[in-house]
Amino acid sequence: MYKPANMSLWQGRVDEFEGEAGLRWHQLIQPFKPGVAAGVTILGFASDAGVKRNQGRLGASQGPFNARQVLANLPNRLSRPVYDAGDIICSNDQLEFAQLTLACQVEMLLAARHFPLIIGGGHEVAWGSYQGLAKYAEGCHQQPVIGIINFDAHFDLRQDAKPSSGTPFRQIAEYCQTQQSPFKYCCLGISEPSNTPALFNRAQQLEVSYRLDRDMSWQQLPAIEAQLDQFIQQCDWLYLTVCLDVFPSAIAPGVSAPAVCGVELALIEHLIQNKIKPAIDANGFPKLKLADIAEFNPEFDRDQQTARLVARLTELITR
């Protein structure tokens, strides 16, 4: 089900003596309507149906609503308008319908030249996000090669009877095969104890570019950047997805599957800021077309710690 934006969620501090330099997102954000000037558009995917199917901790369906409370107080550093396009709400285990609805919304936003930032919800959001980008790509004169960059402790390549939060990138791989298009997937931050040998074998078969969490350190930055550069060069468009369980549970307690080790926030910020966002295509346009943030579970958050992480990442990606 699609639910239009509830603008009453956008409330926060007002620095009335600071002028325009003191404005925050809640003072600027507008409900998305067809025909508005192109900008950054927030879209919620309120679902933990995939997490439930994947036997994870429930509560991620409340992520988009909770995140907006912290996003509201973000200082305005954007050079373009910001909108709220509402939420896709998954109810009664109607996950496939919710993902299709999300895909239609993403395709519509991209066609209107907006940058969609989707906030989940479980990582089942990825199948809906990718479908929307792929449908939009079908309208291009020359089909772009779409690359997925996933910061995640899990491959999410699982083979299962029903799609879940553990299957989206296998679903994408199968879709690419039917379309005779390359499956380009880079997954950084993999936790070896959290992925079975079957998943590592599948990643190898699919030629996934990946890196373990223990190999994501500042000492190894040159090798990480070289790996990411090589991947980005192979792609025309980029889809960035951040699963919050890639971070240590000390800074991201509010997730469906907390990490024991995790990857340092500053390192991931560096890669997004200095490698992913600056990437441009042959025509000088940004390769990054779409992003989502997955697995935010307010049920297990502490003092809005994970919600603030979502806000920080949102500000970094969209600025």
Image (tube, helix red, strand yellow):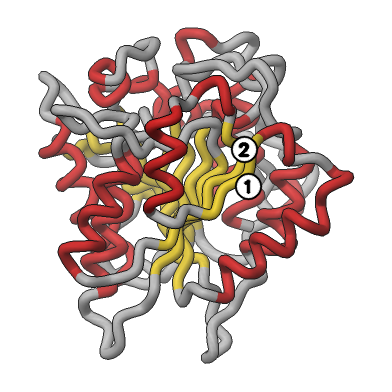
Q: Position of residue 283 (x, y in %)?
A: 52, 91
Dot 1 corresponds to which residue?
315
Q: How many marks?
A: 2
Residue at horizontal 24%, vertical 56%? 131
Quadrant of the drawing holding the N terminus: top left
Report if the CB atoms under discs 1 and 2 are less than 8 Å apart. no
Task: Tell me, for residue 189, which label it has, or none.
Answer: 2
Q: Work out whether mark 1 precedes mark 2 in sequence or the reverse, and give the earlier one.
A: 2
Residue, far right: 219
Residue at horizontal 51%, vertical 66%? 288
**Can residue 270 be seen from the camera position used here?**
yes
The vertical placement of 223 against 79, above or below, is above
Q: Position of residue 19 (x, y in %)?
A: 75, 51
Judging from the image, what secondary structure is the residue with disc 1 in? helix
**Can residue 29 be seen from the camera position used here?**
no
The vertical placement of 153 against 16, above or below, is above
Residue at horizontal 60%, vertical 19%? 259
Taking depth in this image into account, of 44 and 82 the one nearest to the observer is: 44
